[in-house]
Image: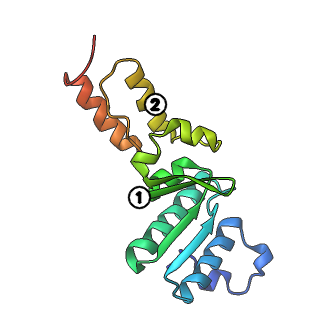
Amino acid sequence: MVGLDYEALCDRSPFELSGGEKRRVAMAGVIAMKPSVIVLDEPASGLDPRGRDQVLAEIQELHQEFGFTVVLVSHSMEDVAKLARRVVVLHGATLIADGPAKDVFSMEDVLSRAGLEAPQVTRLMQELARRNMKVRTDILTVEEAKREILRVLGGEGRVS
């Protein structure tokens, strides 16, 4: 379920496992307990891009297949944008934003107060809008941005 080959790892010391393997073993232990809520603190930090994508995909799978509620604590807004429907922003011990990801990521001033920025692709779309390109600014993924930019360049909404 977590992408580990038991036979290949069963005789190895935990100290010989890679960072990604250690995280997968930890996730397997959590899954075995069948919780209704899983809290993950920076689950993809320190991983290479491939490992990061795998861990994020596994988190998404846990939610979709088993119905676990996943609370993801992260400073990577790209990771949050990929996974979260709801975003809660804390600054110190104060709740400063709570809502759908698209809404929260449009609150540049609120994010800035917490030392955060919207995902890069969202910031790109916001900058294009500031430069009079009539694009949606609530874009969270590269695929969404591609479709929106092609829509605009196709003649719908470009300002001269």
Q: Residue furthest left?
A: 155
Q: Is residue 39 above or below residue 155?
A: below
Taking the spot 62% from the left edge, 40% from the top edge, the residue there is: 113
Name the disc covering residue 124, or none: 2
Residue 48 visible in image? yes
Residue 117 visible in image? no
- What residue did someone put label 1 on? 85
Mark 2 neighbour class, 10 Å CA radius: few under 14, some 14 to 19, many 20 or more: some
In the image, taking residue 21 as reference, residue 141 lies left or right, namely left
Say which element carries label 2.
helix
**Colour scheme used in the picture?**
rainbow
Taking the spot 55% from the left edge, 75% from the top edge, the residue there is: 38
Name the amino acid type tagged 1. Arg
Mark 1 neighbour class, 10 Å CA radius: few under 14, some 14 to 19, many 20 or more: few
Displayed quadrant of residue 7? bottom right
Name the amino acid type tagged 2. Leu
Q: Residue furthest top?
A: 160
Seen from the viewer's position, the closer of residues 81 and 113 is 113
